[in-house]
Image: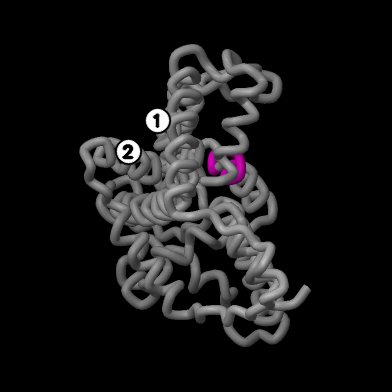
């Protein structure tokens, strides 16, 4: 597969899939570099240490980029696997009501606020006095997605192994509660970051209902960076093929989008009232088809 083919596949993927690709790529790159660094004894610590978020403010000022990089770094394969499974599941649910840009934005916001709460806790809560920790993983970002989705579709049924059907709101509550109870555990930093991520999801959803989009600066920054490094592809003219190529007019496209939105709103209203299982097979198919086009 060529580089251009990889870029094309990435560009047409769903936003949650793109985030999964990035996390996996970072894991592989960091693992390879750590092996090389360790075998060559180039420095006493691994490369991943300069990508994880430190609870030490003085170290953070030297590695300021870690407030972003840490949410894409996973040290263990199991940690990566579990987080990516959750991102895949809840990313799909999130896109039933929101856009791809909002998914990316809430992922970044959850990671930033989760990291900020983690650092503040380690520096101002007496229990953590004198303790220094490193934070990594997408858990805070995923927690933000879970909470935001649960607030929007609280009664969405989720099937869990050995448990059965559980409403999404209760799954979110239990997940947050587990993090609260784990604040003094060996993974205290991670659990605190989860709470910060949950707070980000709640804050974004509440403010969005008041037409305040707090992730707009994040989306704008991402778009600016993407535009900076991307180049407009050259279009090759093919008159013979163009003769048979049908392109929808703006009016047709807008009418189709409005109809899709009306159908989606009706289906989501039915889910909120009676649950996912109340949908007919045709409605389930419509929901799946529309969500793929978002």
Q: In this view, does 217 lie to the left or right of 32?
A: left
According to the picture, the residue beneath numbered tag 1 turns out to be 152
Main secondary structure of the magenta stretch: helix
Which span is picked out in magenta? 86-91
Query: Quick check: is 89 in the magenta stretch?
Result: yes
Position of 275 relative to 238 (above/below):
above
Q: In this view of the protein, which residue sits in the foreground, 221 or 34?
A: 221
Q: Position of residue 279 (x, y in %)?
A: 59, 17
Label 1–label 2 contact, CB within 8 A: yes
**Element under label 1?**
helix
According to the picture, the residue beneath numbered tag 2 turns out to be 205
Could you tell me if residue 141 is visible in this image?
Answer: no
Q: Where is residue 24 in the image (x, y as percent from the top left)?
A: 65, 61
Position of 228 relative to 13 (above/below):
below
Could you tell me if residue 270 is visible in this image?
Answer: yes
The numbered mark at residue 222 is none
Pick the quarter of the image with the N terminus: bottom right
Position of 42 relative to 59 (above/below):
below
In which quarter of the view is residue 159 placed? Answer: top right
In which quarter of the view is residue 33 placed? Answer: bottom right
Q: Is residue 87 left or right of residue 207?
A: right
């Amino acid at each position: 597969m060529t580089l251009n083919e990889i870029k094309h596949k990435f560009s047409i993927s769903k936003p949650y899939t793109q985030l999964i690709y990035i996390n996996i790529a970072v894991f592989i790159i960091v693992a390879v570099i750590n092996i090389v660094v360790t075998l060559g004894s180039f420095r006493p610590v691994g490369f991943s240490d300069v990508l994880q978020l430190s609870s030490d403010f003085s170290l953070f000022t030297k590695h300021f980029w870690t407030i972003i990089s840490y949410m894409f770094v996973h040290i263990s394969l199991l940690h990566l696997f579990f987080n990516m499974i959750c991102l895949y599941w809840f990313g799909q649910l999130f896109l039933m009501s929101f856009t791809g840009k909002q998914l990316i934005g809430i992922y970044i916001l959850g990671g930033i606020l989760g990291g900020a709460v983690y650092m503040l806790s380690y520096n101002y809560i007496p229990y953590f006095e004198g303790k220094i920790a490193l934070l990594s993983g997408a858990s805070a970002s995923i927690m933000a997605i879970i909470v935001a989705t649960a607030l929007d579709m609280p009664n969405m049924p989720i099937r869990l192994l050995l448990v059965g059907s559980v409403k999404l709101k209760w799954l979110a509550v239990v997940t947050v509660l587990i993090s609260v109870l784990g604040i003094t555990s060996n993974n205290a930093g991670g659990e605190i970051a989860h709470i910060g991520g949950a707070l980000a999801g709640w804050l974004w959803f509440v403010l969005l209902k008041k037409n305040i989009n707090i992730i707009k600066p994040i989306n704008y920054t991402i778009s600016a960076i993407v535009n900076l490094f991307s180049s407009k592809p050259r279009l090759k003219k093919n008159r013979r093929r163009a003769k048979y190529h049908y392109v929808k007019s703006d009016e047709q496209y807008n009418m189709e989008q409005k109809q899709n939105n009306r159908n989606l709103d009706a289906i989501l209203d039915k889910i909120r009232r009676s649950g996912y299982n109340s949908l007919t097979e045709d409605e389930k198919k419509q929901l799946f088809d529309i969500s793929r086009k978002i």
